[in-house]
Structure formats: C-alpha cells, structure tokens
Image (cartoon, rainbow, N blue to C red):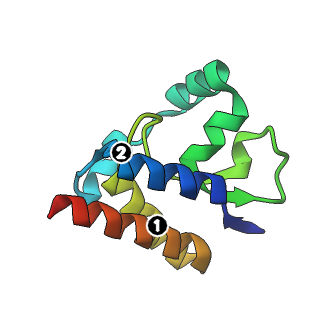
Amino acid sequence: MAVRLNNRAFDHAKRLVKEQLVVLDERDDWSEHRPSAKEENSYLEEHGFAEYQVWYLGLDDEQAEENKGRYKFPYGDFEKVHRCGLLTVESRAGQYKYTDIELAAAHLHGMLDQLRG
C-alpha cells in the first residue's frame, strides 16, 4: 500500500486549529465521534471529493482519486478537528510506519494541547 501524507488535509487541519474549530476530547471518544459511513456518504454527496479529502491525513496512491478507499486516517467530523481523531491517526500511522502521517498528526496534536493550556 502506497499511503502518504495528504498535504491539503494537513494544511486544512492546521487552519481549523488556528481558528479554534476543534473538539478537545479524550482518546477513547473517537469511536463515538468519528463520522459513520452514512455521514461520510452524505458529506461526499453534498460536497464532492475535493472537500471530502481534506478530512483525511492519508492518501492511498493505489486507489482511484474518486474512490473513498483512497482517503485514510480521518481526523474530524467534517466541521471540527477532534483531538481523539488525531490521537488515533498518530498511533495507527505509527503502527503501519507511515512516518509522515504520524508526524503530521503529532504536530496537530501538539497544537491542540497548546489550546488546552
């Protein structure tokens, strides 16, 4: 699998954090906060792949561009960045040795922790 950092998503997430469009939740909250497949499909139908993809820190180059399977490592709910989502991305990317994605998630996590005080 050729998964790499989605720089557009990384820039989007940094902008949202700077605008404080964040949820400062706990690691275990992601299972409840992560968008469902139905919510993903609805967002995709309404906004298209160009906007959908900025919510995923990973891109799988082996998948077609207009395919949900191309977009990996979600970090938010299509409105805000979730700390629990970033923590999940950070650990999963680390497990799979996607260092660029792991480091991007860690950077964003650090930005959120600064907001937390």
x then y, percent, for residue 37: 54, 33
**Quadrant in which the C terminus appears:** bottom left
x then y, percent, for residue 68: 70, 41
The label nearer to you, 1 versus 2, is 2
Q: Is residue 98 visible?
A: no
Q: In the image, what residue type sits under mark 2?
A: Glu
Label 2, secondary structure: give it. loop
Identify the residue under disc 2: 19
Q: Give the image quarter of residue 100.
A: bottom right
Q: Give the image quarter of residue 88.
A: bottom left
Q: Residues within 10 Å of mark 2 (few under 14, many from 20)?
A: few
Give the vertical position of 103 relative to 46 (above or below).
below
Give the vertical position of 41 relative to 108 (above or below).
above
Residue, x 22% and y 59% (percent of image)?
115
Residue, x 71% and y 36% (percent of image)?
50
Residue, x 56% and y 31% (percent of image)?
40
Residue at the left extreme, as displayed: 117
Q: In the image, what residue type sits under mark 1?
A: Ala
Q: Is residue 37 left or right of residue 110?
A: right
Mark carried by residue 105: 1
Q: Is residue 80 left or right of residue 28?
A: right
Q: Is residue 11 left or right of residue 78?
A: right
Mark 1 vs mark 2, CA separation in Å: 17 Å
Which of 29/7 is in front?
7
x then y, percent, for residue 55: 55, 45
Q: Is residue 44 visible?
A: yes
Query: How many numbered callouts?
Result: 2
Give the vertical position of 60 relative to 46 (above or below).
below
**Quadrant in which the N terminus appears:** bottom right
Which of 79/91 is in front?
79
Q: Are marks 1 and 2 in contact (CB under 8 Å)?
A: no
Q: Mark 1 vs mark 2: which is more N-terminal? A: 2
